[in-house]
Amino acid sequence: DAKTTQPNSMESNEEEPVHLPCNHSTISGTDYIHWYRQLPSQGPEYVIHGLTSNVNNRMASLAIAEDRKSSTLILHRATLRDAAVYYCIFSHGGSQGNLIFGKGTKLSVKP
Amino acid sequence: EAQVTQNPRYLITVTGKKLTVTCSQNMNHEYMSWYRQDPGLGLRQIYYSMNVEVTDKGDVPEGYKVSRKEKRNFPLILESPSPNQTSLYFCASSLSPNNRYMNTEAFFGQGTRLTVV
């Protein structure tokens, strides 16, 4: 199984940065790391993905460790709308191509 | 607007009464899949389709059928629903599978909450 380990929950204050960690020690060299989030009562939403280098987009930044066994999703300024469950995922080869969701990290944002 | 549309959003049905949940995407994506989400079990893939007329089982396919006659549509069929299929269902599409050699953003529908009594 493509297993990742994330904290069950985290809290943040509004407008402060948030660092969401993920361990993926069994990742292989060509597996991409994906992050999705699921807001209450909605389907999962793509956040960011990367392979080796750190990545930035309009939603977040992704910092990937040099050994690729862990990564950190960074929300630079948390808003109330960022309260969601964040999933760190990697696809473990094959052509099935499914995203194997773990339990994710439930992020709460306090005003 | 790029989107995946599921219908219905909510459905209550009785055991054994055949039902279909529709899924349509407007992005010309080749890859489509169905997931179910249950408390404590997370999201699990039911079926997937690489392209038109190509479908295959995911991790929890028992009790479900799918078809892919057109690129944009990927209906989920429950021939004889049972209470253990009560769940929240999501359809997803992407340009290609998220395997190790290709990667692409997956778009998810809003979900269908199914209750089988």
Image: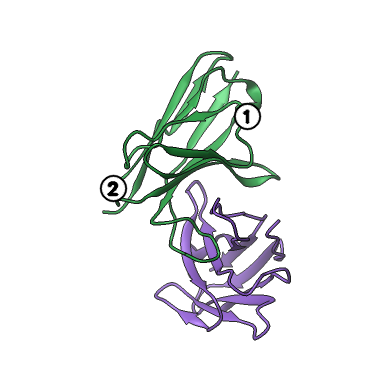
User: Which of the chains is purple?
Assistant: A
Q: Nearer the viewer, residue A48 or A94?
A: A94
Q: Residues within 10 Å of mark 1 (few under 14, many from 20)?
A: few
Q: What residue is rendered at 52% in x and 61% in y?
A: A36
Q: Colour of chain B?
A: green
Q: Quadrant of residue B63?
A: top right
Q: Chain of mark 1?
A: B
Q: Is residue A43 above or below residue B114?
A: below
Q: What residue is rendered at 60% in x and 34% in y?
A: B61
Side (left or right) of B33 relative to B40: left
Q: Position of residue A58 (x, y in %)?
A: 39, 75
Side (left or right) of B97 relative to B83: left
Label 2: state its secondary structure: loop
The residue where tag 2 is placed is: B26
The residue where tag 1 is placed is: B62
Q: Tell if the residue under mark 2 belongs to the same chain as the one under mark 1.
A: yes
Q: Nearer the viewer, mark 2 or mark 1?
A: 1
